[in-house]
Image: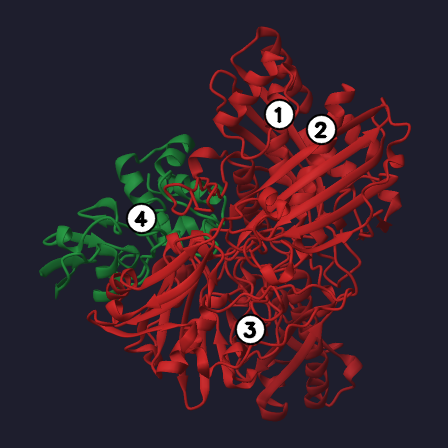
Chain colours: A red, B green
Amino acid sequence: MSILGTRVIRTEDPRLLTAGGVYVDDLRVPELAGALRATFVRSTVAHALIAGIDTSGALAQPGVAAVLTAADMTDMPPPPPAEEPAPDAPPAEGPVPLGGKWSEPLLAVDRVRFVGEPVAIVLTDSTYQGEDAAELVSVDYEPLPAVPSIEAALAGDTLLFPDTGTNVCTKGGGDVSDESIFDGCDIIVEGDVVNQRVACLPMEGRSTAAVFSDGKLTVWASTQNAQLARLILTAVGLPPDAIRVIAPDVGGGFGAKIGVDRESIVVAWAAKHVGRPVRWTETRNENLLAMTQGRAQLHHIKIGGSRDGRIKAYRLDVIQDTGAYPRMSGFLPMLTNLMAPGVYDIPSVQAAYKVVVTNSTPIAAYRGAGRPEAAATIERAVDWFAAEAGLDPVQVRKLNFIKPGQFPFVTKTGAPYDTGDYEGALDKVLAAAGYEELRAEQRRRREAGAARQLGIGLASYVEITAADAGAGETAKVEVHDDGTATVYTGSSAHGQGHHTAFAMLVQEELGIPMDKIEVIHGDTDLIPDGVGTYASRSLQLGGSAVHKAALEVKEEAARQAAALFEAAEADVMLDTETGLWQVRGDPDKSLTWGQVAGNADGGLIVANVRFTADRPTFPFGTQLSVVEVDTETGKVTLLRHVSADDAGPVLNPVLLEGQRHGGIAQGAAQALCEEILYDADGNPLTSTLADYAAITAAELPSFELVTSETPTPVNPLGVKGIGEAGTIGATPAVHNAVIDAVSHLGVRHIDMPLTPERVWTAIQKASAK
Amino acid sequence: MKVELTVNGKEITADVEDRMLLVHFLRDVADLTATNIGCDTTSCGACTVLLDGESVKSCTVLAAQADGHSVTTLEGLASDAGEMHPVQRAFHEEHGLQCGYCTPGMVMAIVSLLKENPSPTEEQVRAGLEGNICRCTGYHNIVRAALAAAEASK
């Protein structure tokens, strides 16, 4: 029986549950014995020139080995020349901390651009000593006016990078001025939709340890891809083969641990500079100040169509707040533009973006990275349009969906959707939720003028996964003469369950039981070439690579078995139930994997592959939220969340459900409570977990998951990505539900997060009209 | 100052700074690294351990305050024979963990919660876990694990 599609509980768990994971700060390896603890001195002002840094007070403290600033980095190679990328060059997927006129220094040189920007690094024997000494580093700031918002950035009165002459670091997309696309529309809705800045908030913050010895730099980093981290770490002036990066257990990433940040480069440099091992683990306060954050887009939308609900034209104009340094250039809003029309066949679509710098924490990928923003706004816009037209949002969606027969379908923004059944997913959710009964209950409460109104929100979404399909992923599968197998993957687990999933793929093809399969990732000495885990790419690219390598191992094993059997290759076969090689028609003769591998050179059968796909995949689904809104206080309670998330055939429902649950919670969190805030001077107001409203179990219901599986022809497994889908659908579903609960009071839109204050205020405003 | 703690049944005596937090004592002195640190404001619960059988956030207890007391961490939860505690087993079976970072604190918080209320409703479990943040699971399977552990312990 095939193991694929069955509920296999994780092989990763027993260790995590009894001894705990080994995250960077848990490492007790001999190389790190006596390591110095790094503490960063961070800017306390949003925008200032640095007139001087006095480290003498800190240096006089006990246990202080060094206090280093940018001025000490004379042994670093100069940053790469400031090259303008070619206009058609694809934007970098990961953080690009060096080079260019918008360059991010490793430590602040003469200017700081956000509160939390690293200015100096203090190396001490203990963590407590580091905290004490860092307090005594005196930085002489000459404050500059802060640019705390998109509006201030566009006003341009103060520039973050004066040499550039602007705060707009890039722009792209098409024309968004041609009004003729709205000609003949009966209903037109136009407005602003804010996709607020949120924290990625992996429970393990950033952490790095480094040792430089015998010309080789070894770095342990909490990263989503050791190989990209290694490439970034060459900034210390070493070639890649003189650097080993190891990703031990990683406590979540959500996009913010793609590669490594400037702090990790500084830690690695410091270890080399002082000739002692150095380790750094950030505090949550540092994490909320300086780990890259997500979203932070302002959308101006216009949507028009006929009175019967047919959408004729849609415009999305995006302004991306990229924070103090444009880590990802225009990549995020470009994806938002690409996915602008969502699941709808809209005859005219316009999309454009511009990216501005502000005195705030840099923005980079966060679960969905550009796509949740697109889905949030088109789904909000469709509901807004439906409300104006007085139509049921289900009816408007069904009328405008791209139909199953239209795939492959290229949208007006150029997205090549592979497969989909949008109406099918919607119908499943409506049936599971009991849509008509919910509407009836809503009517009852409205008619009764109940204080607690019911809202039903829908989001039908499509997203792009493995956008960099051509980069593919690597895998090496080895079968040893003891009958065990080892899988080396360039993909990089940090909670997703790669080890279980990839072992299942190998068992399926080779019949070697999972408990004899070891999966290894995240060590550049063992796996020099790899791409990593982000953009929901792991199973479709990393898994397909493992699958491909297993098939190649099987081919070679067939040759070895044939030789041992003295039979024709075509006559040998593998029984994947028993894991035994046999000759057709002679069931008495069999060979174990150990025997077959033992016959190969070195007692090892190995296949080393890279799998690439020729295009991305487009998972889709519908999510439905039911909320109760207390109209007297504005408080929102999420009562139910029903979700159909279609990522093709399911390898392991346990892992799939886990990804969906986590995604839905993060999506709901953005809709309901989470937001990173700054005051008018660029001071962060949400820099601890006492201030940042991270969602908890008490604010969420159990989720109701509905099955939907539409395969893709893009890879041999037929799978699409599932890591980000939950988040992408949940935000607009919850958002729409809240608006729906109060739409009969005249409310058409409230920006996220839908806090009691915002909801209450919107109700007051609408009723005052 | 000198402190004497019983950690997972083992006595540990050490000279520590007055200000040393219990979580740092566990990690750096007792060398038990399962207990993680997830915040600095007693908000996330990653560092939850049992102090004389009651759950505490070990980032908000000084090692000095635990002097003379008994601490149980995740490492001390399984039986001497290595058999997982019902809560650990339920986390495994219900896929109650992904990255594993909040897990030690979650498990300890649920052990404590079930001690106080052996048959909680889903709502009681959710309310009881309000001080423990997980970013991976959406809490769905953690809640299920807590309920399953309660059921299994009957």
Q: Is residue A394 left or right of residue A10?
A: right
| Spatial separation of the CA atoms under disc 2 and disc 4 | 44 Å
* Residue type pointed to by label 4: Met
Give the percent coordinates (x, y) of residue A359.
52, 51
User: Mark 1 against mark 3, which lies toward the viewer?
Assistant: 3
Q: Which residue is mark 3?
A: A232
Q: Are marks 4 and 3 in contact (CB under 8 Å)?
A: no
User: Which residue is drawn at the image coordinates 71% and 38% (left, top)?
Assistant: A300
Q: Are marks 1 and 2 in contact (CB under 8 Å)?
A: yes
Chain for numbered disc 2: A
Chain for numbered disc 4: B
Do discs 1 and 2 belong to a common subunit? yes
* Labels 2 and 3: the sequence-earlier one: 3
In what element is the residue under mark 2? helix
Q: Which residue is mark 4?
A: B108
* Residue type pointed to by label 1: Ile
* Labels 1 and 2: the sequence-earlier one: 2
User: Which residue is drawn at the image coordinates 39% and 62% (left, top)?
Assistant: A21
In what element is the residue under mark 1? helix
Q: Residues within 10 Å of mark 2 (few under 14, many from 20)?
A: many
Do discs 4 and 3 belong to a common subunit? no
- Between residue A447 and residue A640, name the one nearer to us: A447
The reply to whether residue A648 is visible in this rendering is: no
Residue A383 image label? 2
Chain for numbered disc 1: A
A219 is higher (above) or lower (below) than A410: below
A576 is higher (above) or lower (below) than A340: below
